[in-house]
Image (tube, helix red, strand yellow):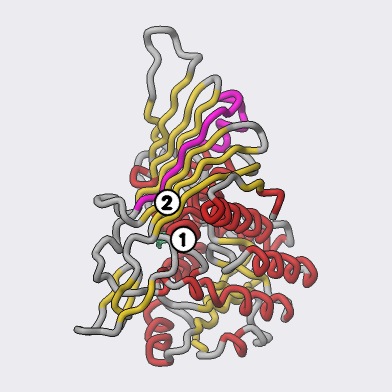
Amino acid sequence: MKEINVGMVGYKFMGKAHSNALSRLGMFFDCSAQVNKKAICGRDEAAVKKAAEKFGWDGYETSWEKLVTRSDIDVIDITAPSNAHKSIALAAAENGKHIFCEKPLALTLDDAREMLESVTKNGVRHQIGFNYRFAPAVRLMKNMIDAGKIGTIRHVRASYLQDFIIDPEFPLIWRLQKEICGSGSLGDLGAHFIDLARYLVGDFKSVMGMQKTFIKSRPMVQEMTGLSASAKEDAPRGEVDVDDGTVFVAEFENGALGVFEATRFAQGHKNDLSIEINGDKGSLKFVFERMNELQYFSAGDEAGLQGFRLIQASEGIHPYMSAWWPTGHVIGYEHTFVHEMFEFFECVVNNTPASPDFADGVKCSQVIEAVELAAQRRATVDISSL
Ligand code: SOE
């Protein structure tokens, strides 16, 4: 069997999620190639050595510049913070490596476009980590929309709500520093529903929005893992220069309207992504915190018996579910990463276009930048103007 060797940059939250996904592939999917976790890379040698042992990597590197040049590496998986995405991707593409990159693609639209140009010029496969597209219920939603089950789409509402930084003394992590993350709730959370809306509804035409930073100064971080962090007593403080919350309205190319909310100040909402799509024949609603279910209303149901029904998207018939457990044995967040990785490596081994790819990443960055401009100008911004 063909073998594909992976080098991954980053070893924290997404590094762990991707390592887990890579380890599950051959166990649950009939892959066309054996995917090997060759080397994991991070600047802190003690930490990355420990991650290599814990996550089952053959080895480790402390220089991504060296990793991308290794002749025994076929794919570079970028899970480092957003400010590192562009330099790693450009170097990897120039060395002929296929690339999987976490979202958002880059700090700016220009950087995202440069990354797309590079992977295209170098003829390598490329995919971006919009993992929620790979929830079975979302795939079912897409199939139902494409089959005309809800007719012409008129309205979309999506939100991605968290509350992990609501404590004003939560430290200044990289997700709150523009030079590292590009934008706050909009790029980190909003990127996901912008991509889902593009996947399920179509491209954005124009946006109008508002952004706010509620807590403008936080103690510098000492340690961080996942979404937890700590700071020393009387730590120096730094400026929060990204949005704590973003709300925007949108018109789509197909004429539908949309309402969108991304915030980390929705007390009680831990990782609450949801999207509802209303058509002239029915409606569909996906809620990540109940990710094995899909809410469906059909205007075709008998009068007097109509209502939102709850489809159990954990039946074997639904996308990806037959790879896992018997009907009704639900799956979770980490399985969406296994699904996206399976699809990516099939594209690498079969030399076919991956999806969502860097072009989707550029389109997402275009909407992000349009919303930021609209908020600054207090005006509508046409996506085509960027
Ligand atoms: C933090 O907000 C975060 O980890 C995002 O970066 C991920 O993309 C999202 O899936 C979960 O929350």
Q: Amino acid at mark 2?
A: Ala
Q: Is residue 243 left or right of residue 1?
A: left
Residue tagged 1:
188
Which quadrant would the N terminus be assigned to in this image?
bottom right
Q: In the picture, which quadrant includes the C terminus?
A: bottom right
Please give the name of the residue rendered at 43% of the width and 92% of the height, measured from the top-left corner: 45
SS state under label 2: strand
User: Quick one: which residue is furthest to the right in this view?
Assistant: 121
Q: What is the number of the mark on residue 262? A: 2
- Camera-side residue of 346 and 262: 262
Q: Amino acid at mark 1?
A: Asp
Residue 26 x %, y % = 51, 63
Q: Is residue 320 above or below residue 215?
A: above
The answer to whether residue 284 is above or below residue 93 is: above
In the rendered view, tell whether residue 301 sits above or below residue 156: above
Determine whether the beta carbon of the residue marked 1 sits less than 8 angstroms from the nearest atom of ligand 1. yes
> Tag count in the figure?
2
Q: Which residues are magenta?
A: 141-161
Q: Hey, which residue is sitting farthest left in the picture?
A: 233
Identified at 53% across, 66% down, the residue is: 102
User: Which of the two discs, 2 and 1, labels the residue nearer the N terminus?
Assistant: 1
Q: Position of residue 369 (x, y in %)?
A: 59, 58
Q: Are marks 2 and 1 in contact (CB under 8 Å)?
A: yes
The verdict on residue 160 being magenta is yes
- The residue drawn where x is 39% and y is 70% is 240
The answer for how far apart the CA atoms under marks 2 and 1 are is: 9 Å
**Image x and y of residue 140, in percent:** 51, 37
Judging depth in this view, the residue of 209 and 28 nearest the camera is 209
